Image: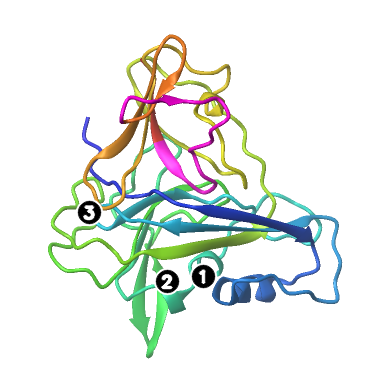
Amino acid sequence: MCFRMCGNEARWTYKETKMKVTVAMLAGLMAAGFLSAASVTGNNHAVVVQKEIRASSTGWQFICVPVNAFDITGGTGGSIDVTSLFPTSIYNEGAQISILAEDGTFGGKPNYTLTMQDGALTWVQTEGAAALKPGDILWLKNGGTTGAEESDVSTQSGDTAAAETQITYCGQARTRTAPARGTSGAMTPMKNDGAEAIGLSDIVEGGPQTGDQVLVIKAGSANYLRYRRTKTAWKAPDGTTIADTEKPILAGEAFYYYAK
C-alpha cells in the first residue's frame, strides 16, 4: 500500500442558524468568519464548520465537503461553487484541489488549480473534470511551496508543508450516512461529511471488527496516525484506549479505513 499524503489534525467548531442568507453572503462569510442575515427566509438551515488544518510534510490536506450546496428551497443536490468553499483571497497561486472518484481513484490531474488570469487569481477547472459536489473527498494543497511540484498526489514528495490555515465551510446542513465496512483486506477512503465529530466505532455501518484500522493525517509528517481495533476497544497510536465517548474524526475530515 502506498498512501504517502498526510497532514490533518484539526480543531473544529460548529454553528447553526435559521436560513436567512443569500449565496453571496455565504461566500462572504468565508472571509468574514460569521453568518449574515438577509431579507429572504427559507425552510432549511445554514451551517458553518470551521476547522484548523495542518498539512502533511508534503503540503497536502485530506478533507471532504461537509455541507450541501446552498438551496433556499431546502434541496440537497447540485454542485458547489469551488470559490465559495475555497476563496481565492486566502490561497496562493498554484494551489491544487484533487477530487477522489467514487472508487477512490484520481483522474490523473488536479480538478482545480489556482491560476492568475487577467491579473486575478481564479480556480481553473481541468477540462472534463467533475465539478465539486457535497460529500466529495479531496486532497487540497496550498500554493507557494518549494521543491518538486507534481500533479499526481500519490507520488508527491519534497515539498515544504503549506502554512497552517483555517478552512471554513458554509452551506446547507448535511447529515452523514455511515458506509459499509468495505472489503476485507482493502484500504478504503472514507469521510466525515456531516457537521459533527464522530467516534471510531460510528464510522462504518454495523461497527468495526477486530483488527480494523483507521488512518488519519498526522501534521507535518509523511506517516498517518493509526488507530487499531482490538477485541474490546480502539487503541490510539500510542497504545492507549480510546473511550467510546471520544470523537476523534472531525467534521470535514477524510481518512482511510482498513478492514481486516
Name the residue type under label 3: Ser
Q: Residues within 10 Å of mark 2 (few under 14, many from 20)?
A: many
Identify the magenta region. Answer: 238-255
Q: Quadrant of the C terminus?
A: top left
Q: Please say whether residue 168 is visible from this viewpoint.
A: yes
Q: Nearer the viewer, residue 43 or 12?
A: 12
Residue ID for mark 2: 123
Residue 102 falls within the magenta-colored stretch: no
Q: Position of residue 125 (x, y in %)?
A: 41, 65
Q: Residues within 10 Å of mark 3 (few under 14, many from 20)?
A: many
**How far apart are the alpha carbons under marks 1 and 3?**
25 Å
Vertical comparison of 43 with 94: above or below: above
Q: Position of residue 98 (x, y in %)?
A: 37, 54
Task: Say which residue appears at 44% left-offset and 42% top-offset.
Answer: 254
Q: Please say whether residue 69 is visible from this viewpoint.
A: no
Nearer-N-terminus badge (1/2): 1
Label disc, if present, on residue 57 of the rendered structure: 3
Q: Quadrant of the N terminus?
A: top left
